Image (cartoon, rainbow, N blue to C red):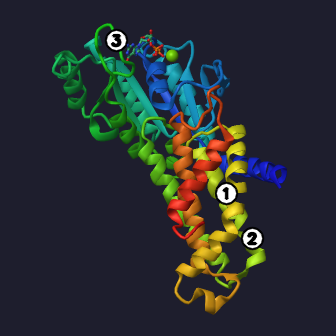
Amino acid sequence: MPDWFTDAFRAEYEHQLELLGRFNLALFGKTGVGKSTLVNAVFGEPVAATGIGEPVTHDAHLYLDDRGRLGLLDTRGLEIGRDDRQLVKELEAYVRQMRRGPVEDQIHVVWYCVRGMDRRFEPFEAEFVRRLADLDLPVIVVLTQVPRGPGGQLHPDAVALAGHITGLGLPIVDGRPYLTYALEDPFSGQSSYGLTELLEATFRGAPEAVHAALTAAQQIDHRRKAAQARRFIAGTAAGAAATAATPIPFSDATVLVPLQLAMMARIAQLYQVPVDRAALMAVASTTAATQVGRASVTGLLKLIPGAGTVTGGAIGAAVASSFTYAMGEAWLAVVERVAAGGLRGLDGMLDTEQIRGDFLAELRRRVPRLR
Ligand SMILES: Nc1nc2c(ncn2[C@@H]2O[C@H](COP(=O)(O)OP(=O)(O)O)[C@@H](O)[C@H]2O)c(=O)[nH]1
Ligand SMILES: [Mg+2]
């Protein structure tokens, strides 16, 4: 059972990854303005050394770095202000070529980055932004490394620059730049800010179809992950109810397992819990779930008025739905704890016994009659 389950979970984990797709972000701006720092602050440091990515154009100045749920389109060897025509030409070719492919291969949002203290936004930059917008790309202008005063007030020079850019009436998301400081600097006492607002704007710019991928890719807003997980739990619970619309005999309750497996895999993906850990966790918790399954179904049957007498030893829609829902919520609580760095042993590794115990406790809280 555990081996079968690990394999099944791994397959489902991959399948859910495909369904989730990828959010593609294009980065433009001069070297050293803080593009990489910004990306890492919002999406987390790359797990492995990702290198420079794969060239995506014939002329090979555009590179796509595949970081799982996040695709990063970056420029090498071309500078805005010097090679704009070449850059726009390559970009046009790429966008055209991609338009024929699936949504998940398109560029979804552009961050055009300007160092907030540079005090200038030049005409060729405005022109470049317009060309991006002409390609139907949602462009967000980001002012990077904008310091704040002791009272939290934004540096007046950056505010002036933002006002200037807003006044240009560019076709950019929300019509104005976003001011940020991505990486805290303990020496000068600067803390990071503006990232959540930038992420919100990115969601507004991105097509609905990639919101789930963006939710999984970003690492700063866990409430969005939880909300997405809950939508999926509700959908799975409804699916379980449909499956059990004709009551399932007790012994056939395993027909619900694939649904629950998909649900758990999707939640693990949303929180980017790596597959080996996820498989381990799934095995641990589902063993627990199977153990308590019988007891809980009996318990749930007692909770639903008339269920016991009407369906006898069978699981009906209401019970299948409630139990799947409780499993989803319990699993979500466990995954959130793992994502926050918890449920580890003294050696820092994930502790299967802790996870199992935790999942059981969470499940019990949600199914009160459970032994
Ligand atoms: N403290 C601090 N340093 C930053 C910030 N953004 C960029 N830097 C620094 O500026 C330098 C260039 O940043 P990088 O992200 O590599 O720029 P890129 O060339 O646009 O990708 C690096 O040394 C960063 O550590 C920030 O928000 N805070
Ligand atoms: Mg960089």
Judged from this view, the residue extending furthest toward the bottom is 310
Left or right of 341? Residue 172 is left
Say the numbered circle drawn on residue 186: 3
- Quarter in which the C terminus is drawn: bottom right
Q: Which residue is mark 1?
A: 262
Q: Nearer the viewer, residue 160 or 239?
A: 239
Residue sitting nearer the eye, 256 or 104: 256
Q: Are marks 2 and 1 in contact (CB under 8 Å)?
A: no
Upstream in the sequence, badge 2 or badge 3?
3
**Label 1 environment density (alpha carbons within 10 Å; few <14, some 14–19, many ≥20):** many
Which three-letter amino acid code belongs to the residue tagged 3? Answer: Pro
* Residue 135 visible here: yes
Q: Secondary structure at mark 3?
A: loop
Q: Is residue 99 above or below residue 330?
A: above
Q: Is residue 20 visible?
A: no
Which residue position is annotated with label 2?
Answer: 255
Callout 1: SS: helix
Q: Identify residue type, mark 2.
A: Val
Q: Residues within 10 Å of mark 3 (few under 14, many from 20)?
A: few
Q: Is residue 313 above or below residue 96?
A: below
Distance from disc 2 to disc 1, alpha carbons, whole Å, reads 13 Å
Q: CA distance from mark 2 to mark 3?
A: 55 Å
- Kindly identify the amino acid type of the residue bearing the numbered disc 1: Ala
